Amino acid sequence: MSTAIPLVTVQAPRGGRAVGLLRGTGAAGIASAAVILAATVVAVVGPALAPFSPTLPNLALAFVGPTGAHLFGFDYEGRDVLSRLLAGAQSSMLGPLAVVIGALVIGTLLAVIAAWRRGMVDAVISSSLDILFAFPGILLAVLAAAVFGAGLPAASISLAIAYMPYVARVLRGAALKERSQPYVAALEVQGASATSICLRHIVPNVMPLIVAQATILFGYAMVDLAAISFLGLGVQPPAANWGVMISENQVGIPQGYPLPALAAGACIVAIVIAFNVLGERLFEQAQGAR
Amino acid sequence: MTDPGGPQEASREHQAGGAGDQPVLEVSGLRKEFGDLVAVDGVSFTVRQARSLAIVGESGSGKTTIARMIVGLERPTAGTITACGRDRSSPARSARVRRRRGGEVQIVFQDPYTSLDPRQTAEATIDEVLRLHHSLPADRRRSRIAELAALVGLDERQTRALPRALSGGQRQRVAIARALAAEPRVLILDESVAALDVSIQAQVLNLLADIRDSTSVSYVLISHDLAVVRQLTDDAIVLHRGVVVEQGPTASVLDAPQHEYTKRLRASVPRPGWKPRRGALLGAGKEPVQP
Amino acid sequence: MSETKGRGAARTGERGTSDEGRRRSEAGMGRWVGPGSREASTAPLLEVDGLTVRLRVEGAQRAVLRDVSLAVRPGEALGLVGESGSGKSMTARAIDRLLPRGAEVSGQIRFDGADVMTLAGAGLRGYRNGVAMIFQDPRAHVNPVRRIGDFMTEALRTNLDVPAGEAYRRAADMLGQVGIDDGERRLRQYPHELSGGMLQRVMIAAALLTEPKLLLADEPTTALDVTTQAEVMAILDDLRREFGLAMLFITHDLELAAAICDRTAVMYAGQIVEVRESALLHDDPLHPYTAALAAARPDIAQTAHRLAAIPGRPLSAFEAPEDECAFAPRCPHARDICREATPELIGLDGGLSRCARAADLRGRLRPELAEGGQSDD
């Protein structure tokens, strides 16, 4: 018989799930969420917002500083930097999104299968993941670019594969814990199928952890994809992309025109920090709730 | 509560010779090894319709392992388990067999805090089981949920609440309703009232007695608590280190225990006027401590 | 509170607990009072007086203990019984100075005349040597990577400056006292090599090594099997009497407390609702809650048609109404008077009862008259 005084009494959640999740992350978490939301809006409508053509070069204006109508000046080919930033948001955000979705779907699937079957299946999945851990994402992306050609799809797929073991490892622990709960045993005794127990009970119960993982990974993926684009293996110029912008404007830095490269870098840094802060807060919350 | 089978029984005393003779659960020569450890060894018993059997034992006696083998959560090393005339010693091969077995034997676990999905309301919990076992239209399911909730004494607000908004006793009622939703012939109560406060335990024990009186469900009560065993069961087997040491009607096992272990178990229960005595666990030849 | 007759009335205004103890002595139940207590047979060893504790619960400071008063005399065993949330463990934590941060405490705790709440440094260490604790889960209270001997002798070596060899000898002797043979070998073992019952006996031995005056036992046998419980309780009981140790025994099990303790206090919703000689508690309770608790427990000797369940669920102190009887909503005997104010703890027939109708109900709470049949939540 429990003798502990229940010091924490849980109330029914107020408002939506997302709101409930965010409320616990504090001011920093909410500010981060605002940054991410703004970036998402720009990614969706950005190209339409661009005041000038993001791709039409005008070499006469190369590395010209900011003016009234061109807040961030012009890049090395004389294109409006602000317009390129706005237009580039889409591929800069879409790439990490694809990486995260891919890594999460496969990672969750493997984690839940390992947790459900336990024994041999778990051992095989876990050791395969350990092997995959050994491959750095960038290396995988370089290999993929060499085989399938450079571009966002190949880069995203290889990063997704590289990130998947991290997701699977964290979620396997959580899923194993959920798997051993008596309510899962009760459903098994009822005759419910493994698929239905996993999809309707285990996955939803580890969802807070999945969301936290997704958020943290998004930041990493953005940096790695920018690096891949910087190397010229990701998004191909002249298409606008923040990683590409750093790469193509780096020549301006030693020449005293750092703004175009820095502006793109600042966008990446701001969003990565926002995702990391929010992700850490969500992760702590998910762990705390367990 | 609709009757899963058999006629309604007004009085349990009258069942011994009638429909109650029909065995609903038969266990024979059950054995379970975990590596070198023999957890359960040569356990056999029969549970008849609307009768209740207690499996009494302390930790490590193998009583919970027996429960887990009966409901298919563990696979027996040897021996047979037959429920409603059908063998269930080996894992179910198809979804249909799994569901059928679920409709024969159900279980209520000890800890009311972990035996419910924290994200599911009582209503949704019961509904999921109804969907699994019966193809009923939505309005029939709703009325069945209301019936089951009324049977276990949950009000409408509690039925719509998530587990965290319910007390331990209320959660255990939800777990009982979930088990009954499958209309099982046998309900295994694995220390189901052990974690509850005394005042709540009495409510749940009364509820279980009511359910048995209004249906012909049989109970297998796994318990270390002899008073609870006395209250709820007709027959008892006493398990010690995986072996049955005594077996018989609950009243005679408790009132006139034959085996040394049962006697010791009985003598260890605190009651008015009871004084604990040293030496029960110490072997002979050890010096009692003198002041 | 009547404080008029009986031998050795030393304190007045003590909410009647010493009055209680005196009656116990008169009834001849004080015969186990140990040698250490003879010179001060009436002054309480531990006194809790009007203890109220407020903690932050759900974003507000709320009372988890309300006006708890009790006294344990030298060599006496007092049981403290209650369901979840009754405050029995919180009382133990307050006595051991283990309340969570931010707790607001009013009232007094005195041990051997010293104010426990203001102890610090050497005084606090001395107090902790004088009050030994035994917990429900021994494994959570021993360091798994240290040997039993190391654990058992730590307090002797560090607090009492006993040489290591002497400390180990005493520890091995004490293991013999709690029925563990081969003490020398056990001292070299690690906690994981011992069973739960064995480890709890080690905890008892360790607790007795510093020669405390009071044993604070918080559900020491709840996690143990019933036969192991009987063994451990017997050891605890024997040694307590042998060493003349007072004990505050905290449990949810009314029958266990009644069997082990001289007197038993029953808690409900953060308050003490009854204090009674254990021998009378079951058959002649003073408070309807005690009666209901005893009646709700199934009887091993006979099958009841229906158990006398108490409707509703046990309330935590912070959920209970502040200005009426906390048990009234579940009480079959509740009348309007019960909802007018929180009843005082009043002396009655040698015991104490926090029931506005206690005098009215005398003789009507015996188990054979218990009302049954309520099973609603």
Image: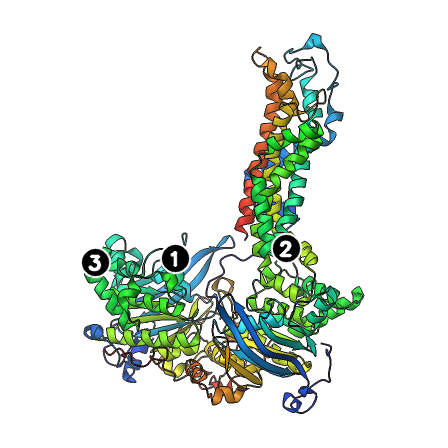
What mark, if any, has residue C258 been given in the picture?
none
Q: Say which chain tag 3 marks.
A: C
Q: Nearer the viewer, residue C68 or C186?
A: C186
- Residue at 47% x, 87% y is B257
Task: Residue under label 3, please give it.
Answer: C164
Drawn side of residue C305 relative to residue C358, left or right: right
For label 3, the crowd category at 10 Å Cα-Cα, with few meaning under 14, some 14 to 19 and many 20 or more, is: some
Compared with B178, A108 (above or below) is: above
Q: Say which chain tag 2 marks.
A: A
Q: Are marks 2 and 1 on the same chain?
A: no
Q: Secondary structure at mark 3?
A: helix
Marks 2/3 in contact by CB < 8 Å: the verdict is: no
Residue A287 point in image, percent of width and height = 54, 49
Residue B280 point in image, percent of width and height = 36, 80
Task: Residue under label 1, please give it.
Answer: C99
Compared with A67, C73 (above or below) is: below
Compared with B127, A87 (above or below) is: above
Residue C239, visible in the rendered structure = yes
Task: Give residue C282's quadrant in the image.
Answer: bottom left
Q: Are marks 1 and 3 on the same chain?
A: yes
Task: Give the position of the N terminus of chain C as an image quadrant.
Answer: bottom left
Q: Are marks 2 and 3 on the same chain?
A: no
Task: Give residue A213's quadrant in the image.
Answer: top right
Task: Residue under label 2, please give it.
Answer: A202
**Total number of numbered discs in the rendering:** 3
Q: Amino acid at mark 2?
A: Ile
How far apart in space, not on screen, are marks 2 and 1 (Cα)?
37 Å
Task: Give residue B188's quadrant in the image.
Answer: bottom right
